[in-house]
Image (tube, rainbow, N blue to C red):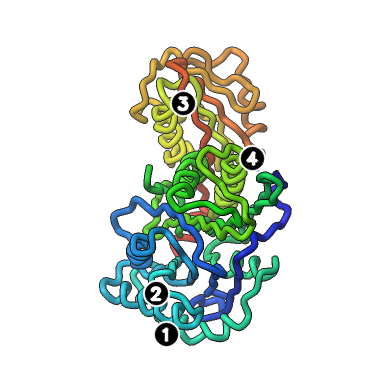
Amino acid sequence: MSDISQLVIPRGFRFGATKAGLKASGRTDFAVIVADAPASAAAAFTANRVSAAPLQVDKEHLRATGGRVRVVAINAGNANCAVGQAGLDAARATCAAAAEVFGCAVNEVFPSSTGIIGVPLPAEKLIAVMPELAARIGSESDHFQQVAQAIITTDTVDKTAFARIDVNGAEVRIAATCKGAGMIHPQLVPHATMLVYVMTDADVEPAVLQVYLNDAIELSFNRISVDGDTSTNDTVLLLASGASGAKIETGNAEFAAALQQVCTSLAKQVVADGEGITHVVELRIEGAASDADALKAAKAIAHSPLVKTAWAGNDPNWGRLMAAVGYSGAEIDPEKIDIWFGEQRICRNGGRAEEFDEADAHAYLQQAEFSITIQLNQGEGKCTFWTTDLTAEYVHINADYST
């Protein structure tokens, strides 16, 4: 398996981006991913019941094609959400234009949007630049990077990850990009927005691909939170072109591991680019009654403003962690809980550990990245969860987002 930073572009796809005039910054804001032939597709979408128009169209199209996609059309700067029938009309007009320009069926187009909610999407701007964009797409790394850069909104950096494996003598490549920095607490089913696009040149049937995707996102994108808000537009799309000729069936552990590696890398990049953050925190919940209980405890901690602001101030106030675990709904015995900041034991059997050194703990929490381990001593359940602190800068970014 290759390093996630080593750029390898799957065969069977072309990429490109341009300026459609949706971003106030004037930067690129419209991107396409084009499969040379209909690619197998698997997708997961937000569980938010207020869902953007493109997601409704995506679900319709995937059902109609049996999980096949030729063109992914992504705009940034406008979420195309909460605008009623006009939103659906805009998404469908974009698909119709893409189908004509790229020579595919309308239901083989997968639209995505991110940006401000409640503002009608001017689809005519996307349609106007589509022919010029189609003439410039390509399969090189710089074309892929164009997509990564065009889809960002409040992100400070673009986010990519790569892997490659050998399957019976054939090289299989995986490349992925995503955006997300705020409004991040993905609740992807089954099980500012996060959009994820993963491409592979493996040959995988849609139903099999969906199983691999579900497994990968459960331990990556469903294990992160910046602010506890679940976006209206969250989307993860996995496409398989088959161009490598390597057939992947159910149960290929190496492919599953490579996909998991890529998704986890992107998930952690999203957290590291969280709006206004100064700390990335890895929560390790161990000894829970079940994995589900471990996740409950992790989410309660990750979503607590009191905990997150303590982290922002490098304050080793471990009592806030105890309180969050206590109301999490997880099965606990308060007198059996142990807590570590890194290697330093903070809490033993539900009380302050004798070796707890507040000055050392404060110094440890000054690091840009740190880990907290909580042992519940209830069973074998566990989870790892990545989150952030909550700063005044986060408030400034989101107080001024639309004005």
Q: Residue at label 1?
A: 124
Of the pair 400 and 119, the residue shown nearer to us:
119
Q: Residue at label 2?
A: 106
Number of other residues with Cα within 10 Å of mark 3, as a class: few under 14, some 14 to 19, many 20 or more: some
Q: Residue at label 3?
A: 319
**Do we see residue 225 in this rendering?**
no
Q: Residue at x 58, y 23 (%)?
A: 340
Of the pair 384 and 15, the residue shown nearer to us:
15
Q: The residue tagged with tag 4: helix, strand or loop?
A: strand
Q: Is residue 33 above or below residue 383?
A: below
Q: Mark 4 or mark 2, which is nearer the start of the sequence?
A: 2
Q: How far apart are the alpha carbons under marks 4 and 3? A: 21 Å
Q: Nearer the viewer, mark 1 or mark 3?
A: 1
Number of other residues with Cα within 10 Å of mark 4, as a class: few under 14, some 14 to 19, many 20 or more: some
Q: Residue at label 4?
A: 369
State yes or no: discs 4 and 3 in contact (Cβ < 8 Å).
no
Q: Nearer the viewer, mark 2 or mark 1?
A: 2
Q: Mark 3 or mark 4, which is nearer the start of the sequence?
A: 3
State yes or no: discs 1 and 3 in contact (Cβ < 8 Å).
no
Q: How far apart are the alpha carbons under marks 2 and 4? A: 45 Å
Q: Name the amino acid type tagged 2.
A: Val
Q: The residue tagged with tag 2: helix, strand or loop?
A: helix
Q: How far apart are the alpha carbons under marks 3 and 2? A: 56 Å
